[in-house]
Image (cartoon, helix red, strand yellow):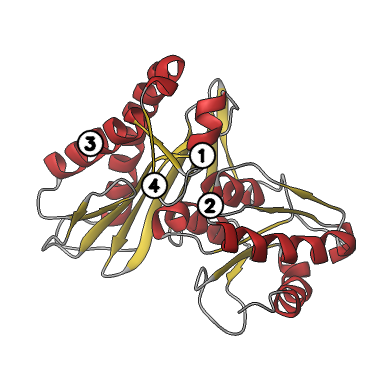
């Protein structure tokens, strides 16, 4: 467990701050959904959208985190960037699943992770539509809390084989990126039980941690897409890795039940011929 002069258990302190901040941001996100489509801009492509609520959520999150810990660094999807001097950096996605948010699909989340000296030690992913809170501390397991229910520890799933595995994935926003991702999923589909696409990398990683899917993979994730969710998946006992011996999300992110991780990674390496 991570410790520091800030206290006997820095990771637990960071987790609690992340949780409280995510709950406040999720309330803002939920309150703004009805009018979210009134102010929409685009980023990397015409289908890559950002709403005024994304920006407001990030401003709230960064403000709360730095008010509590003014020496920390921050990296946020909507432009927040600060080096900091404490060795702690927050990696923030104010709404992961913005397209779902615009359409009213109940799969969009506030994701907040805390790094200490470059290692993610605490993370929360809060589905603002349902109230489900996924959380993890490095070395302390992964947990799911839901309104009106006792927290439960997450352990992933145990599929018998790859051809019986339910696999989640996602797609980027640039045309060439999508073409390559489409080629990979077309080759994968005949080899697995089925494919799912939730529209939020953070929640898809957490779905794998909860055993709602057996594996998740995606190309070209950003740090804010996966920092908290990858920790939740790892602490739930999933294999969290990249392909071709590379680290997770550089450029392929794979989180899979241990029994199918090897065959899935090998198949993805075979299919991802564009790299």
Q: Nearer the viewer, mark 4 or mark 3?
A: 4
* Distance from Cα at disc 2 to Cα at disc 4: 9 Å
Mark 1 lies on residue:
97
Q: Regarding mark 1 in the picture, which secondary structure is present there?
A: loop
Residue toward you, 262 or 76: 76
| Residue 23 percent across, percent down from the top left | 37, 29
Tell me the residue at 68%/63% (across/down): 256
Spot occupied by residue 204 in the image (x, y as percentages of width and height): 61, 48
Q: Are marks 1 and 4 in contact (CB under 8 Å)?
A: no
Instruction: Identify the mark nearer the N-term, 4 or 3.
Output: 4
- Judged by depth in the image, the label closer to the viewer, 2 or 1, is 2
Q: Are marks 2 and 4 in contact (CB under 8 Å)?
A: yes
Mark 3 crowd level (few <14, some 14–19, many ≥20, 10 Å Cα)? some
Q: Residue at x 88, y 58 (%)?
A: 164
Q: Identify the disc placed on residue 59.
A: 3
Q: On the image, numbered disc 4 is attached to which residue? A: 43
Determine the CA span between mark 3 and mark 1.
18 Å
43 or 254: nearer the viewer? 43
State the separation of the CA atoms marked 1 and 4: 14 Å
94 on left or right of 10: right
Q: Residues within 10 Å of mark 2 (few under 14, many from 20)?
A: some
Q: Is residue 93 left or right of residue 180?
A: left
Mark 1, other Cα within 10 Å: few <14 / some 14–19 / many ≥20 = many
Q: Quadrant of the N terminus?
A: bottom left
Q: Position of residue 235 (x, y in %)?
A: 54, 58
Q: Residue at x 73, y 66 (%)?
A: 184
Cα separation between marks 2 and 1: 13 Å
Report x, y in % for residue 136. 46, 51
Evaluate whether residue 131 shows in this view.
no
Residue that mark 2 sits on: 173
């Amino acid at each position: 467990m991570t410790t520091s002069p800030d206290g006997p258990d820095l990771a637990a302190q960071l987790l609690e701050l992340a949780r409280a901040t995510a709950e406040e941001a999720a309330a803002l996100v939920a309150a703004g959904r009805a009018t979210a489509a009134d102010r929409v801009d685009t980023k990397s492509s015409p289908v890559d959208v950002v709403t005024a609520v994304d920006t407001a959520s990030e401003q709230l999150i960064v403000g709360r985190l730095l008010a509590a810990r003014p020496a920390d660094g921050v990296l946020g999807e909507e432009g927040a960037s600060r080096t900091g001097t404490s060795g702690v950096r927050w990696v923030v996605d104010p709404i992961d699943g913005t397209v779902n948010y615009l359409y009213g699909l109940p799969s969009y989340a506030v994701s907040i992770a805390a790094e200490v000296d470059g290692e993610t030690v605490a993370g929360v992913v809060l589905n603002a539509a349902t109230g489900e809170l996924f959380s993890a501390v490095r070395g302390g397991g992964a947990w799911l809390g839901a309104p009106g229910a006792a927290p439960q520890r997450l352990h992933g799933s145990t599929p018998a084989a790859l051809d019986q595995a339910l696999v989640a994935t996602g797609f980027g926003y640039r045309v060439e990126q999508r073409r390559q991702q489409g080629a990979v999923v077309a080759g994968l589909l005949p080899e697995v039980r089925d494919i799912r696409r939730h529209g939020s990398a953070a929640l898809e990683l957490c779905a794998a941690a909860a055993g709602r899917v057996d594996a998740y993979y995606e190309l070209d994730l950003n740090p804010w897409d996966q920092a908290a969710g990858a920790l939740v998946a790892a602490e739930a006992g999933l294999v969290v890795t990249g392909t071709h011996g590379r680290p997770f999300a550089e450029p392929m992110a794979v989180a899979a039940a241990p029994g199918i991780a090897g065959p899935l990674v090998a198949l993805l390496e075979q299919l991802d011929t564009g790299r």
